[in-house]
Amino acid sequence: MYKTVVHLDLDTFFVSCERLKNSALEGVPLLIGGKSDRGVVASCSYEARYYGIHSAMPMRMAMELCPHATVIRGDMDLYSYYSKMVTEILQEDAPVLEKSSIDEFYIDITGLDKFFGCYQWTQELIQKVRREAGLPLSFGLSVNKTVSKVATGEGKPQGHRKVDAGTEKLFLAPLDIRKIPMVGPKTGKLLQQMGVRTVKTMQEMPCELMENVLGKSGSVIWHKAQGIDPSPVVPYSERKSISMERTFDKDTIDMEKLRTLLTSFTAQLAFQLRQETKLTACVTAKIRYSNFDTHTLQSRIAYTSADHILIPKVLELFEKLYSRRMLIRLIGIKFSHLVHGNYQIDLFNDTQKMISLHQAMDKVNMKYDDFLIERASGFTTEQAAKRREHRKVLLNRIFAERELKGKHKRITSAFYG
């Protein structure tokens, strides 16, 4: 039996939230992001897109393209509020709901056609969201998550697209390869250099060729291009959490050591969030004194997985929590109210340089399955010395791998001429 999967996407979500707050912004080119010349565009209205502006574009370039655009710094608390509102509306009716990001959702409605028309049921749900939350959104409906997501993109803005079972490949064939999830700018450019511009061309290629060019991800992309995606809709839950804590061999009041340890904990947990494409909306700090009295303090925050946002919040909670000036036996932190999402950076404050730095750090740490690059503030002098020795071993391994890879390329080149 075919599955029935709906993909919902809140159209220009940040922009729509700002317009709910201020109706004077309706119909004007609107940019959300950092206001400085070094800032970047987090989101933009369709009126701004007319001028060639897109998200992640440097703000300076965007203002050159549209000098009369209105720029707003952005308010993640506001966006988190409306995201939660929409989530609660969907949860009332959706059989299986997955929240894939702050403004995207998947719903598995397999079997509902026995009682309702799946298409009609989805349209009624969309109208309910628009009526109760006041936000515009689009949806796509098909047999799997990939095709539904692409269908949503084809239906925007404030539209919809239904792809009947058995027609997935035909629907995808004429589209640009960049419409396929996982095909980013670099992958898209590489495929275009190979002469692959439409999904139809990729559909006709052998899967082995895609694997040779892109590795394991090449096979996944090839199957997506065929309209094949077995990944399930993962039920949404806000109750999950991740945490770290340390019980000391000897009770301590060394504040420098405690802050350093909390910084290290936060950076590692934030990296774990980004690895699992999750965001947290609640931070908790924990202290256990030498007399075993245990105290916790938590704070709700806008959804994030950025360590440079989370670290100050953790240290702030610790300073408020530590009021008795007694020896400490244990400290810990916890991130809860987790959701799936990819907003890893604060696009309202970060520069393009900082964004690139964070992405490069994560790429290295994920590739070598070790926390190879960390913040210096997360170490004591003794720990830093130990980590330097550990890094030497890892870096020697990296250089050895590169040298071997280079030899392999030279041998292959010589063999094929």
Image (tube, grey):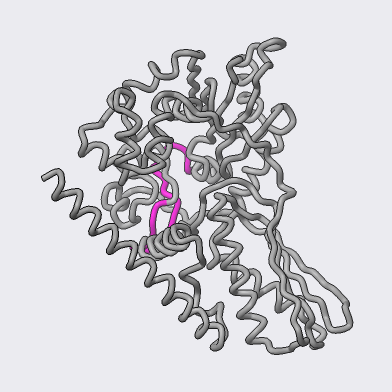
Query: As drawn, is 11 to the left or to the right of 404?
Result: right
> How far across and how far down the image is residue 2, in percent?
58, 16
The stretch of residues the image draws in magenta is: 25-41
Q: Is residue 350 visible?
A: no
Q: Nearer the viewer, residue 90 or 328?
A: 328
Image position of 266 with respect to 167: above or below: below
User: In percent of the image, x 57 and y 54: which residue is there?
Assistant: 76
Q: Nearer the viewer, residue 396 or 232?
A: 396
Image position of 149 with respect to 218: above or below: above
The stretch drawn in magenta includes residue 304: no
To which quarter of the image does residue 306 belong? bottom right
The quarter in which the C terminus is drawn is: top left
Q: Nearer the viewer, residue 8 or 108?
A: 108
Q: Residue furthest left?
A: 417
> How far across and how far down the image is residue 401, in percent?
34, 62
User: In percent of the image, x 42 and y 77: which residue is there?
Assistant: 392
Q: Taken as a whole, is the magenta stretch helix, strand or loop?
A: loop
User: In percent of the image, x 71 and y 33: which residue is there?
Assistant: 91
